[in-house]
Image (spheres, helix red, strand yellow):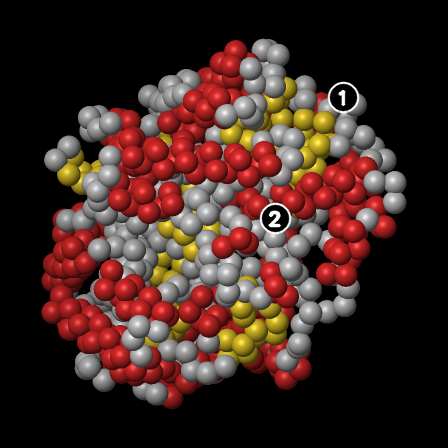
Amino acid sequence: MKTTIIGYPRIGDLRELKFASEKYFRKEITADELERTAKEIRQHDLAIQKSSGLDYIPSNDFSYYDGVLDTAFLLGAVPERYTSLGLSELDTYFAAARGYQGDKGDVRALAMKKWFNTNYHYIVPEIDDETEIKLNGSKPFDLFSEALESGVKTKPVIIGAYTFLKLARYKGSKKAEDFAEQAAKAYTELLEKLAALGAEWVQLDEPSLVTDMTAEDISLFKSIYEKILADKHGVKVLVQTYFGDVRDCYSELCALDFDGIGLDFVEGKESLNLISKYGFPTGTVLFAGVVNGKNIWRNNYAGTLDIIAKLRGFTDDIVLGTSCSLLHVPCTLDNESKLSADIKKHFAYAAEKLTELAELKKLVLAEKPEETAEFVRNAALHSGSRIEGNEAVRQKVASLGEKDFTRLPEFAEREKIQKERFKLPLFPTTTIGSFPQTKEVKANRAARRKGEITQAEYEQFIEKKIAECVSLQEEIGLDVLVHGEYERNDMVEYFGECLDGYIFTEKAWVQSYGTRCVKPPVIWGDISRARPMTVRWSKYAQSLTNKPMKGMLTGPVTILNWSFPREDITLKESAFQIAHAIREEVLDLEANGISIIQVDEAALREKLPLRRADWHKDYLDWAIPAFRYVHSGVKPQTQIHTHMCYSEFADIIKDIDDMDADVITFEASRSDLTILDVLKENSFRTEVGPGVYDIHSPRVPSKDEIKTAVNKMLGRISADKLWINPDCGLKTRGTEETVPSLENLVAAAKEVRNENS
């Protein structure tokens, strides 16, 4: 019995990579200094994994920005517009990830999408008909050699050829199958080079195998790997899957000459059934994902040992591992100085999950595992309930009926009422909510937290920032304003702090994309609204202007999806509890004169099951009603907005329309506004604002660029339903980028307005 993990967090225990990268972007440190920090993180993480007793330690799971982007550079699948800039290799990489605007040129970043059913974002590879896929980079070899110098022979990890080709975006007439032979040849050469360096195992990640696969998909997968596995050059090849089960291709997977097959027994509902029904190939190692790589709760050893015992009925050659990369959980509990021991004992971050694997390995080999100290301690942790429930909340959720999810009058009538009330111009302009969180804002928040300023002084500062923000928006000429969200540390954590049933960590940072890290709050008990959450600030902001002020809230599904959820009740029940709390806030805002309320559901699609057959019964049948419950009680003249970012919406566009919002804003610019065709094809009734520029890039879009995007929209969206706005909130941008970008946005909208009036 051996142990492994699929990957380890790469940001550093205290987000060292984030801070070093941002210094590099600001030209405060050199590329060598950035690499020095990166190497220190890798060496630190390697030491932790080695000391834990992990048998197979991964390498190449480190990335400066994103592993899929790393693979694109490894395979030479980099659009010419980046390579022709004449930048260094590292800066070319960052140009593809973030965009570039400088003396070498002006290019937008590659598209960004959610990584399967997680809150992590990957950079979408772009392949055109002239692309030649071939081994081009050296990163996996360099990092394997680096670890070897430290005395550790690692298991190199690379995104598999099939998943890479399935995730790519094709800009010409060629499709994935046209690049299969090139990809297979590149991966064969990859194995050869790793073998020459002394690698024994190579892990090829193929999460696309857990999605719905057609006969053509299965054929593509087989054709690629029959070529790759024809000559493995003496290394053992592990095909690693995660985020679900491989029910569509299990037989084909087992028939190929893989030395190891990695299956997920946490999210993979059918994984155990597949092995029970079809067996497992003799001579192949089963890499069993039995420790949850996505959530922070301690593993229940009794349940896991039961799964392992069943698996051993089919094979004894098992490696215990995590269900997915530990990228999706924080690094270590060691830095959580404020959580009590009674709370911390329930949690396992990445480092603690290594300990869990070591203990499970010991228990499997023990003659009487139930008598070991590890098992007894774990069993006590999982006996009984730690929850002090809120019976009133539970009863309210249990009593919800159809009328609670229905807003009257219907959309068309509300739309007329609202147009008459607001009298907004054609193509109204707005932003998504947040404005730049400057050093001054962060410093004042930290000062309040440390007790260096009083709460009254802090609130006075927030009022000052709101007044400045309102004045700035009026000066720019935006039509619907926001208060800037300066009081919020995070769009989920802030709300969690105003809800009973949540607890908060100190250093539980998780990478969302690139240098963006989030600190998900933890749902500890039943959720209820402890106090008004946003009313004071929205009401104050509205008092400063005659223009409509949007109240800004995060929706129940996004709050749930961006938290670490409970595992003792269903996600549906948690969502409805949160929805009830947000509904109370919506009605409170309305009662205090806020006539436009935005309830963001940025993460609605994030937890959509990867298999279409499960979409409604396992998710949409409660996620959409949870949102509808939030706003079903408001008056017809109150306009409800929502926002969604960095997801693929085409396949659930009718469900999104069924959310019954009045206005919806989408991320769209990085995907070249491809969602427009979907909106038109489905006769989307909701008023809509597809983002006209990418806020995740530091570049400033020109007026003409935005105007081109708006005119493209008008070919597919009725002029009386189109809003003009950025992709997402402006929290992560600087004022020096934000102001000219919004000025260009307003100027473009005015020109198009004049041309269409």
Which label belongs to residue 283? 1
Check the image and report above or below for 206 versus 264.
Answer: above
Corner quadrant of residue 204: top right
Residue 97 shows up from this direction: yes
Q: Position of residue 393 (x, y in %)?
A: 61, 80
Question: How many residues crowd mark 1 within 10 Å: few (<14), some (14–19), many (20+)?
Answer: few
Q: Nearer the viewer, residue 194 or 176?
A: 194
Corner quadrant of residue 728: bottom left
Q: Nearer the viewer, residue 12 or 574?
A: 12
Q: Position of residue 257 (x, y in %)?
A: 68, 19
Residue at 41 percent of width and 17 percent of height = 134
Q: Indicate the secondary structure of the residue bearing disc 2.
A: helix
Residue 639 shows up from this direction: no
On screen, residue 264 versus residue 509, left or right, reads right
Residue at 66 percent of width and 82 percent of height = 391
On screen, residue 60 versus residue 442, left or right, reads right
Which label belongs to residue 352? 2
Q: Position of residue 553 (x, y in %)?
A: 40, 71
Q: Of all residues shown, which one is farthest toward the right?
A: 367
Q: Position of residue 729 (x, y in %)?
A: 31, 60
Q: Quadrant of the N terminus?
A: top right
User: What distance separates the C-alpha of mark 1 from that of mark 2?
Assistant: 31 Å
Of circles 1 and 2, the one toward us is: 2
Look at the numbered discs 1 and 2 and tell me whether their residues touch, using CB distance below 8 Å: no
Residue at 53 percent of width and 68 percent of height = 503
- Residue type at mark 2: give it: Glu
Question: How many residues crowd mark 2 within 10 Å: few (<14), some (14–19), many (20+)?
Answer: some
The mark nearer the N terminus, 1 or 2, is: 1
Q: Indicate the secondary structure of the residue bearing disc 1.
A: loop
- Residue type at mark 1: give it: Gly
